[in-house]
Image (cartoon, rainbow, N blue to C red):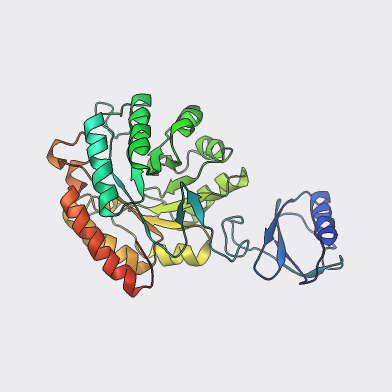
């Protein structure tokens, strides 16, 4: 539920509301809005009987949150969440482009790609040091050595880095290097991992599972926020389909739906969403038109030689051209890239 305070409510009155909620077994969160303060309460939905909140001094009204997800909902927070990392704002008036290779391979490959995407207009560098793969025989990533190469690329270019964490035991290690921790699609319902990343102070990029509903996706985000970490971004990366022309079906209808239901920023990954470089550009432009807050695009200097996901990677030249197209569309939408 959300307790809306009166315009003139005092700090003491807000504290009294929190005390009452604590007595009832709820956890409360104070949200300072533009015009007034609201106190959001999360707890056992089975609590019945009179709560006595409406009669407390300073309370204007009590609004129940009927959706299963609470902290990520618009009822909990009407204003958009803006995640700031390394001076880059995600969820504001700009559309942020995250780009880089699927996997960190070598120092030369990483630095070459990092400079290329930065010069083209990307604000955040992506690259996988840990790679959960369908086959146990596929390249699994360079682990900490890959993290060190990402950190070196950040040092040289000044770009914040986002990389995946695949197990609860690795969260502390990855957080030592990364600016944003990614929870991949295969781990969207790894609840132990979600709780662990919820206990750190780094932003989290949560990818949608390949067969997950929007409710399941938002409930996964709820796990993270319930542990105290409110810096969460949602990433649509395609859902399982029955055709072979694309790797997945990029569900762009999820972008406006999720932005209606939730205050969290929404990122779109057209690389995994299509699986083929030829379709990345059209879907990236469509995602921008659909209202996304950012794009995650795979770029490799020599896709034919990539150790992972070469067919869906853009060359630096193709990426540069795409960013130019995206800037034109962003201008029409009164946004910036």
Q: Position of residue 306 (x, y in %)?
A: 18, 36
Q: Is residue 144 left or right of residue 246?
A: right
State the quadrant of the C terminus: bottom left
Query: Is residue 245 visible in this depiction of the protein?
Result: no
Question: Is residue 56 depicted above or below 104 in this figure?
Answer: below
Tally of numbered discs: 0
Q: Position of residue 185 (x, y in %)?
A: 39, 44
- Identified at 45% across, 47% down, the residue is 206
- Identified at 82% across, 64% down, the residue is 10
Q: Is residue 93 left or right of residue 285?
A: right
Q: Position of residue 119 (x, y in %)?
A: 26, 50
Question: Is residue 169 depicted above or below 113 in this figure?
Answer: above
**Residue farthest to the left, as pictured:** 304
Residue 110, quarter of picture: top left
Front position in the image: 148 or 309: 148
**Residue farthest to the bottom, as pictured:** 332
Front position in the image: 160 or 164: 160
State the quadrant of the N terminus: bottom right
Front position in the image: 114 or 258: 114
Q: Is residue 221 left or right of residue 46?
A: left
- Identified at 49% across, 67% down, the residue is 260
Q: Position of residue 35 (x, y in %)?
A: 68, 71
Question: Is residue 185 depicted above or below 133 in this figure?
Answer: below
- Identified at 83% across, 68% down, the residue is 58
Query: Is residue 125 visible in this depiction of the protein?
Result: yes
């Amino acid at each position: 539920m959300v307790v809306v305070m009166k315009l003139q409510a005092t700090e003491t009155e807000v504290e009294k509301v929190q005390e009452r909620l604590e007595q009832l077994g709820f956890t409360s969160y104070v949200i300072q809005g533009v015009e007034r303060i609201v106190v959001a309460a999360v707890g056992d939905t089975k609590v019945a009987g009179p709560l006595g909140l409406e009669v407390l001094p300073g309370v204007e009204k009590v609004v129940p949150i009927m959706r299963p997800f609470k902290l990520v909902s618009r009822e909990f927070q009407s204003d958009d969440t803006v995640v700031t990392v390394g001076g880059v704002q995600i969820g504001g008036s700009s559309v942020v482009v995250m780009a880089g290779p699927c996997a960190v391979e070598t120092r030369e490959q990483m630095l070459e790609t990092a400079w290329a995407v930065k010069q083209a207009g990307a604000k955040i560098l992506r690259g996988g040091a840990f790679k959960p793969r369908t086959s146990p025989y596929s390249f699994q990533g360079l682990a900490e050595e890959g993290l060190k190469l990402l950190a070196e690329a950040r040092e040289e270019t000044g770009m914040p880095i986002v990389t995946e964490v695949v197990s609860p035991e690795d969260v502390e290690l990855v957080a030592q290097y990364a600016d944003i921790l990614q929870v991949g699609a295969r781990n969207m319902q790894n609840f132990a991992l979600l709780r662990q990343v919820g206990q750190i102070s780094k932003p989290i990029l949560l990818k949608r599972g390949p067969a997950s509903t929007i409710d399941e996706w938002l409930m996964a985000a709820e796990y993270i926020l319930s542990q105290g970490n409110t810096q969460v971004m949602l990433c649509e990366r395609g859902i399982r389909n029955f055709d072979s022309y694309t790797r997945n079906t990029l569900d762009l209808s999820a972008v406006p739906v999720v932005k209606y239901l939730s205050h969290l920023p929404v990122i779109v990954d057209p690389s995994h969403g299509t699986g083929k470089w030829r379709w990345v550009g059209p879907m990236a432009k469509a995602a921008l038109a659909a209202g996304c807050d950012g794009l995650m695009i795979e770029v490799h200097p020599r896709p034919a030689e990539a150790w992972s996901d070469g067919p869906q990677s853009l060359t630096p030249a193709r990426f540069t051209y795409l960013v130019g197209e995206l800037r034109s569309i962003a201008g029409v939408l009164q946004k910036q890239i």
